[in-house]
Amino acid sequence: MNTDFIYWTFTAAAQCVSTFVALLLTGYALVLSQIESARDRDDSLQDIHDALRMSYHSRLTWLAWLTAIAVVLSLLVVWVNRANIPPPDALMGGAAFMDTLAIVAGLAFVVTIIDPRKYQKAAERELEQQAQLKEGEDAANRTPSTEFFRVYRKLERSLRDLAMRQGMEEAPTEGRRGSAAGSLRQVAETLIQHEVISEELYSELQQIIKYRNLLFHGHVKEANFAMVERARHATGKLKAAAKHADHPARTETN
């Protein structure tokens, strides 16, 4: 085998792989800025945005190590290559395999980050993980997602009503597509800061809002019945808090 051919082939391979991954990281930075811009316009994407970043970081870590191994093996082939003694076939085969794997993995990552359904898929994965954490969940514990959204709208009205009774202004939502859940989260934060609701209720509201976001962006047809009941229970607590807020006003009037 021509040793010059081996030298130039694996030298070019190391350069190509490293350059390809560098361009991929640049493209990822641009895509990430677009994702953050979408999150800023739509607060309900916050939870999905966090899940995407964790997933992308995990895959990039794996890709970085894969690229490093591929480049090192290619350079090792070049280093051990001699004028009359070619490198071992196993070393050249391993280097070629890792170079190919790094490029294929990089292309797969590109396809993932430009997928127009990435938000929906991320939401579906999060919901599946939540379902796996709850043992014994079966079809009997499922209900149409429309039922959850119906109860959620009542929860939203109760929370906003409580904020209005306390004389608190809500965060502006004009020009923010799908910002209902986001502004609702901000209202809850305002109420907890003024000690209007308990820490327990605040934590419960955060979980319900997160579940709503995943359900909405995942386009899921069925919801967990337990979450519907939790939303109803939280709504009852908010209505009770609103009545308690009205009591001092009636006392002063009398």
Image (cartoon, rainbow, N blue to C red):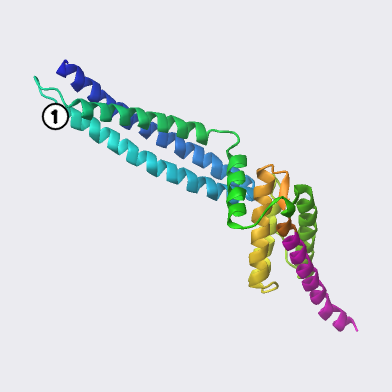
Residue type (three-letter) at the residue carrying disc 1? Val
In the rendered image, which quarter is residue 159 located in? Answer: bottom right
Above or below — where is 15 with respect to 236? Answer: above
Q: Residue at x 68, y 62 (%)?
A: 205
Q: Residue at x 42, y 35 (%)?
A: 26
Tell me where the magenta segment starts and ends, as one range.
Answer: 229-254
Q: Residue at x 54, y 48 (%)?
A: 51
How many numbered marks have been drawn onto this rendered protein structure? 1
Quarter containing the N terminus: top left
Residue 231 lies in the magenta-colored region: yes
Residue 102, percent from left and from top: 36, 32
Residue 122, percent from left and from top: 58, 44
- Seen from the viewer's position, the closer of residues 197 and 80 is 80
Residue 167 lies in the magenta-colored region: no
- Seen from the viewer's position, the closer of residues 15 and 134 is 134
Image position of 80 (left or right of 226): left
Q: Which residue is mark 1?
A: 80
Please say whether residue 171 is visible from this viewpoint: no
Residue 135, percent from left and from top: 61, 58
Residue 233, percent from left and from top: 76, 66
Q: Residue at x 68, y 48 (%)?
A: 215
Image position of 62 (left or right of 89): right
Image position of 100 (left or right of 81): right
Secondary structure beneath dot 1 equals: helix
In the rendered image, which quarter is residue 19 located in? Answer: top left
Please say whether residue 115 is visible from this viewpoint: yes
Q: Main secondary structure of the magenta part?
A: helix
Above or below — where is 158 with respect to 108? Answer: below
